[in-house]
Image (tube, grey):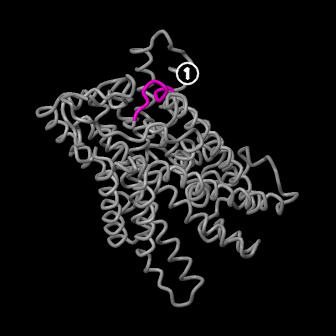
Amino acid sequence: MTDGVAKPELKRGAIGLREVTFQSITAMAPGAAVAASIPAGAAFAGGDLPLSVLIALIASLLTAVSIGELASRIPSAGSLAAYGAKAIHPIVGFFIGWGYIFVYALVPALVFLQLGFTVAGTLSTEIHGYPASLWWPWSLAGMGVVFIINYRGITTSAKTGTILGAIEIAVFGVLAVLFIAKAGGHNTLSVFGTSYTPKAFHGVTGVIAGSVYSLLAFAGFEAAAPLAEEAKSPKVTIRKGILAATVGIGIFYVFTTYAVTVIYGPGKFANFNSASSWQGLAQSMFGLFWILVFFAIINSTLANGNAGTNVSTRMSYALARVGVFPGALAKITPRFQTPKNANIIQLIVSVAAVLVLGLSYNPVNGFALDGTIITIVVVAAYILMNVSAIVYFLRHEKRNFKFFTHLFVPALGVLVLIPALFAGAGVPVFSFISPLPAPISYAGPVVGVWLVLGAVFYTFKRKTAPESLIAISEVFGEEGGEVHLSQKTAP
């Protein structure tokens, strides 16, 4: 670092491929996705939802390949922001980072709202007199647990994420096996066709519509990227972790969706809803097994909150280190080597977002609004990552440019993500997309306001510290782990 000031540094080489992979896995929240996100596509694909999920897996893999290729060249805590800055222009990197940090700061609030209404709703059903409105203490408790885990450093956080992720996968995996066994002669590969789509979305149209909504369950597969500076052999590990998580959880999604479809009945699966959820099916068919499903969903929210906090704090640290954000966010704890102030601010943001959204709109609607905001920005970032992959290899590594990997795959990735962006934002450019009701419809304006604030902040930094914007592409420390700065940062 310049001027003889010791730079803050994350714990190098602290985690390996297993922990990196589970960072991406838990960021996808597979338990919560299987129980809630993926079934949202049943209204469109009906009993052919397994095929929709398979298509969504292939579509997600396109972007995972693009991000993996960029991660193998630019390993850093700044991740997507640095990819865009290096490949296209610093302004692209800035706005990716500005939006990405915003939504990942909201991820813990999203899952802790879910934790609150899931626990309160279950207790009100099982315990006479417990009010379903008393959800917020559970949300606050979850936030406290995740804050402690993250504050104690990446080793504790990553190991905890690995354990929690393995638990939720095991519970839903075992239940899926039980469903398939109980279905017996009703097992059929016909659910991978177009025979069971509802009349309103008959045939291929329904399957494609279902895949668009299923695609949103894969969001988070790239969450390993911000851990590059703490991973062993990051240029290899991050890429492998992202691809392994995408393929592994994709297969898990296809398997579990198949299981619940055949046990419920493909012909009536378009009516699958919360009243006939995984938890309800487990309770009606296997008695007390529903308790394991209930705890697996809770487990999934904690794991997802943990992963989201890892992303937001590392990216905040990376951008503060080069002077884009206040230097205080680059301060780390000497003992745990984790971003101290970034973790504290993340906790404050989580508490505020949960209470404001949950008390203003109720936790379910607050969850839906938060999730829609996240979806809009994340899918837009994925589109930009595909474009960045094309531009990076054409501009910076033309000798290594491969038509299939660096042009065909990312270009196709952009095409399949455009319908997902419109669906997530509720812009009815396709027949299967409906306008969003209030307060979920507020998501677009919220994102717009945040981008306007970003433009104002970018203009300010361009006038006062233009070198910090240029340094976004250098956040990763490409030369021996050194970060090239032209100004001091907080110790």
Q: Is residue 56 visible?
A: no
- In the image, which residues are magenta? 69-76
Query: Farthest left residue?
Result: 463
Quarter in which the N terminus is drawn:
top left
- Residue 281 placed where, x, y %? 70, 69
Q: Please state the horizontal and vertical placement of residue 424, each as a whole percent of the image.
A: 45, 49
Q: Is residue 446 left or right of residue 232?
A: left
Q: Is disc 1 surrounded by few (<14), some (14 to 19) or many (20+) residues within 10 Å? A: some
Front-lying residue, 439 or 432: 439
Q: Relative to 247, does residue 392 appear above or below in the rendering?
A: above
User: Could you tell me which quadrant the C terminus lies in?
Assistant: top left
**Number of marks in picture:** 1
Q: Which residue is mark 1?
A: 405
Figure check: 422 above or below 383: below
Most foreground residue, 480 or 195:
480
- State which quadrant residue 488 falls in: top left
Q: Measuring 36% from the left and 70% from the top, which residue is drawn there?
A: 361
